[in-house]
Each structure stands twice: as C-alpha cells, then as structure tokens.
Image (spheres, rainbow, N blue to C red):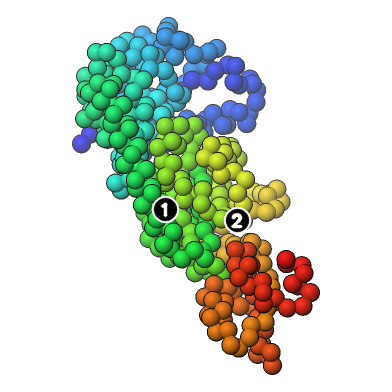
C-alpha cells in the first residue's frame, strides 16, 4: 500500500516567542521533528513542511486565511492528501479547512489518536482508544455527517471509530457509556487479580516520554522480551514482571504507555485504568532519553501528565537513559547538575547495577528495622517471618530465637509483642 503524503504545518505564534531566544528556537525545531515522527509513526510520509509565524490563531481557519490559496496549490503540485497541524484546532476550524482545501485536515490530537488506534492490541487497549476517539469525534459531528468520511480512509479515519462515522450523536453517546462500563468491568477484574497477588510486594512503575527506552529498560532489568521499537507509542498496554532483587518484599516492575507533550486529555481519561498501575506503585522510575536535545522539556511534559493523573508526589527518581549516545563532556555536566539521578544505557547494559542498588536502598528505607525474640514454641510466627520479612540476622538463644529483621511497616502490629529491649519503646 502506498503511504499517504502529509503536509506538516507548524505555526509559531508571536505572542509565545522571544525573537532572539536561541533555546526557544531549538525547542521549536525539535517540535517539528516530533510532529514529523508522529506522522511517520502513524504510517504516512512527509510531503512538505511549512513553517509560519503569525500573531494569533485565525478563528475561522486557525491559519491566516491569506495563506490558504498558496497551501492549496502546494497540495495539488506535490500531490499531498493530508494536512497536519501541530496544535489542537477547533471542530469549526477543521470543518472550514476541510471545505477550503478539500483534503483531510488533522491536528496533533487526531494524529496521536490514530497511532494509538493502530497500536491497540489488547481488548482493554482497543476499548480505551475507541473511547478516546469517540470523545474527540463527538463535538466534531455535524448534522450532515462528517466531512472526513467523504475524504476516504487512512490516517484519522482508522480504528474503532471508522464504522461509527455515520451514526448519529445519540448513538455515539450510548456507545461511550457502554465503553466506559466495559472498561470499568475490566478494571475491576484487574483489581481483584491484583488483590490475589501476594500482598507483600513492592511495586515499581517505569514512566516517561514515549521512545525514552522504558521497555528496553524493563527487558534489561528483568531479562524479558517486551516489544521495543524506535517509534512513538510502541507500548500501549502495561506489562508487569518480577524483578529479582533479592529483597523483601518481592519487587514487581511495570512498563506502561509513554507520554508526550500535549498528550490528548481524551487519552489520559480513557487510559485511566492502564495508568492505574502507576497510581498503585510504591516508586516511579522516570526514564528520560538524555540524547534528545529537548530532554528537560520532556521531563516537564512527563511531570504534567503525572500531575494530571494525580500521582505527582509519589517517590521517584530519574533515570537518564541512552548515555551511549552523548559525549563524555555532557555526561559529566549532567552528573554535576542532577546529583540524585542515575545515568544508564538500557541498550548497552550500563548502569543497571546502580539502579538495582538504589531500589534496594529505597525499599530498605521504606521498611523498618526491628529486633525481636520469638519463643521456640511459636513456630507459626517463625514461618510468618521467613515468609514475609527480610531476615538480617538470626541467633538461637536460651529464651528463644533472636531475629534482626527488615519489615514492611504493615507487619509492625503482628510483631510488636515480640520486640525486646529499648527498641520496643521507640517503635510503639
Ligand atoms: N542508543 C540507545 N538506544 C536505546 C537505549 N534504550 C532504548 N533505545 C532505543 O530507543 C528506542 C525506543 O525504545 P523503547 O524501549 O521502545 O522505548 P519506550 O520508552 O518503551 O517507548 P514507547 O513504548 O514507544 O513509549 C528503540 O529503538 C531502542 O532500541 C539506549 O540506552 N541507547
Ligand atoms: Mg515501550
């Protein structure tokens, strides 16, 4: 199948840029690269890139109307069938542009939704993407039906939304309600499954910008084979693996969907249950692609999403990944600037031991250290200790077994009666 050719339109609004600010300019060129990767990840190719500056969005067409004729002739000359804007355009602007250019016109949100629609594999992933797409489509429906449908298939018309294009608003609303119900049901099943997992686990979530190397890191740390690709949003579903750390409690690590700047709110809402894995985690590893010039603004975008899903404030540390791609000088500077972060290459296996060590320390800090004495007659509690706690030391004395333990705070009450000497006062 031949690829759709896209015209990428990137508009800088004068209000947002300082004229001679180089770092801002660099950020903008990076944004163009990102939009281009989104288009390629969606399966199209870049026909042409247009970059404009304008005072503010035109209410009717988003872009200044004087440019439309020029754009129209470019579309014809270059045989381009798709127009993509980096910003979110309103349903009215989208309709007006469709009419004027006679091409499919998409914004960044539609593009991201399309990529998600192509990647969704699991039942839950598909339902979530359909929900997000319908949420996006609903305000874009006109009484006459949708302009997109008469412009054929391809990007922006694909996925679960496709067959729904002709149905009316009421039907779509009903479908949205039914999708929410289905997603909630799966989510409840997952909670039950989670409860049945042993409850003495420490859960870690890998979070970060898309393509930062989360799945690669999961694979290297747990010797798994999760799908990895140099493409945006290769992972949509969460994968949880056991992390052999020789620590108590047992550690699980979860890889999940990546974030991006201006991640559509419809997707965040629809992926609530997938993102639940992040919410229930005890620790987040924020994975950052340090070889990307824009990595500092990537961290801010990730923080924004974490705030939006209400998990900012949870313990985390930053893992700067792909250090094999940067110069030793930059690495040195970053070490100096980010003293608490770790610097790794998930691909080359550099720095993985440091990650393990840091996690172990965090778990130990999260736990409590206690010394107890158990009478020989109480075998039940001895088995409990070996099952649930980390035994640092054991001595058999005349009056019972002396344990030096690292325990999770939740087991404190069960072990409290056995604490000996002054520690007893401190802990209670
Ligand atoms: N050079 C280099 N490349 C890496 C490293 N880690 C990951 N990559 C590459 O970066 C690309 C993205 O890796 P993934 O692990 O799929 O990234 P991700 O964060 O899971 O991405 P999404 O699931 O799309 O959000 C792949 O081509 C990896 O091979 C690294 O340490 N060094
Ligand atoms: Mg991934």
The image shows residue 43 at horizontal and vertical percentages of 31, 36
Image quarter hosting the C terminus: bottom right
The image shows residue 25 at horizontal and vertical percentages of 58, 27
Visible in this render: residue 167? Answer: yes
The image shows residue 262 at horizontal and vertical percentages of 49, 31
Relative to the observer, which residue lies in front, 415 or 152? 415
- Mark 2 vs mark 1, foreground winner is 1
Q: Is residue 284 above or below residue 24?
A: below
Q: Residue furthest top?
A: 66
Relative to the observer, which residue lies in front, 45 or 231? 231
Residue to which mark 2 is pinned? 343
Relative to the observer, which residue lies in front, 18 or 428? 428
Q: Is residue 374 above or below residue 304?
A: below
Does 158 sit left or right of 265 as displayed?
left
- Secondary structure type for disc 2: strand
Label 2: few (<14), some (14–19) or many (≥20) C-alpha neighbours in 10 Å: many
The residue shown at (53%, 81%) is 380
Q: Is residue 273 above or below residue 409?
A: above
The residue shown at (39%, 14%) is 93
The image shows residue 157 at horizontal and vertical percentages of 27, 28
Does 231 sit left or right of 157 as displayed?
right
Residue to which mark 1 is pinned? 191
Q: Residue furthest right?
A: 422
Q: Quadrant of residue 248?
A: bottom right
Q: Residue furthest bottom?
A: 398
On residue 266, which mark appears?
none
The number of callouts visible is: 2
Question: Whole-Å distance between the Cαs marked 2 and 1?
Answer: 34 Å
Image quarter hosting the N terminus: top left
Label 1: few (<14), some (14–19) or many (≥20) C-alpha neighbours in 10 Å: some
The residue shown at (60%, 70%) is 414
Relative to the observer, which residue lies in front, 152 or 425? 425
């Amino acid at each position: 199948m031949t690829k759709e050719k896209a015209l990428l339109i990137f508009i800088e609004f004068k209000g947002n840029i300082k004229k001679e600010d180089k770092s801002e300019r660099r950020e903008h060129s990076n944004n163009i690269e990102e939009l281009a990767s989104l288009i390629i990840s969606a399966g199209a190719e870049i026909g042409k890139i247009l970059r404009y500056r304008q005072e503010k969005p035109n209410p009717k067409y988003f872009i200044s109307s004087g440019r439309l004729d020029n754009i129209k002739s470019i579309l014809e000359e270059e045989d381009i069938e798709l127009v993509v804007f980096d910003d979110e355009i309103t349903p009215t602007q989208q309709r007006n542009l469709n009419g004027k250019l006679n091409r499919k016109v998409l914004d960044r949100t539609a593009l991201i939704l399309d990529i998600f629609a192509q990647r969704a594999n699991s039942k839950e992933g598909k339902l979530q993407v359909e929900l997000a797409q319908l949420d996006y489509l609903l305000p874009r429906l006109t009484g006459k039906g949708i302009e997109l449908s008469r412009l054929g298939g391809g990007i922006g018309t694909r996925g679960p939304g496709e067959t729904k294009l002709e149905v009316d608003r009421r039907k779509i609303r009903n479908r949205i309600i039914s999708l929410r119900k289905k997603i909630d049901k799966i989510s409840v099943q997952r909670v039950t499954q989670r409860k049945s997992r042993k409850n003495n686990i420490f859960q870690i979530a890998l979070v970060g910008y898309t393509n930062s190397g989360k799945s690669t890191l999961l694979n290297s740390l747990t010797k798994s084979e999760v799908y990895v690709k140099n493409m945006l949003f290769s992972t949509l579903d969460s994968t949880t693996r056991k992390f052999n750390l020789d620590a108590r409690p047992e550690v699980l690590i979860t890889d999940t969907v990546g974030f991006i700047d201006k991640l559509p709110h419809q997707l965040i809402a629809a992926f609530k249950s997938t993102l639940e894995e992040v919410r229930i985690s005890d620790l987040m590893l924020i994975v950052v692609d340090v070889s990307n010039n824009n990595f500092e603004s990537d961290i801010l975008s990730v923080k924004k999403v974490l705030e939006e899903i209400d998990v900012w404030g949870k313990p985390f540390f930053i893992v700067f990944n792909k250090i094999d791609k940067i110069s030793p000088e930059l690495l040195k500077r970053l070490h100096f600037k980010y003293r608490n972060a770790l610097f790794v290459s998930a691909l080359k296996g550099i720095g993985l031991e440091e990650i393990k060590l840091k996690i172990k320390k965090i778990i130990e800090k999260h736990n409590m250290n206690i010394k107890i004495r158990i009478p020989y007659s109480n075998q039940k509690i001895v088995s409990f200790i070996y099952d649930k706690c980390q035994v640092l030391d054991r001595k058999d004395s005349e009056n019972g077994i002396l344990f030096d333990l690292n325990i999770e705070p939740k087991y404190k009450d069960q072990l409290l009666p056995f604490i000996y000497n002054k520690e007893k006062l401190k802990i209670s």
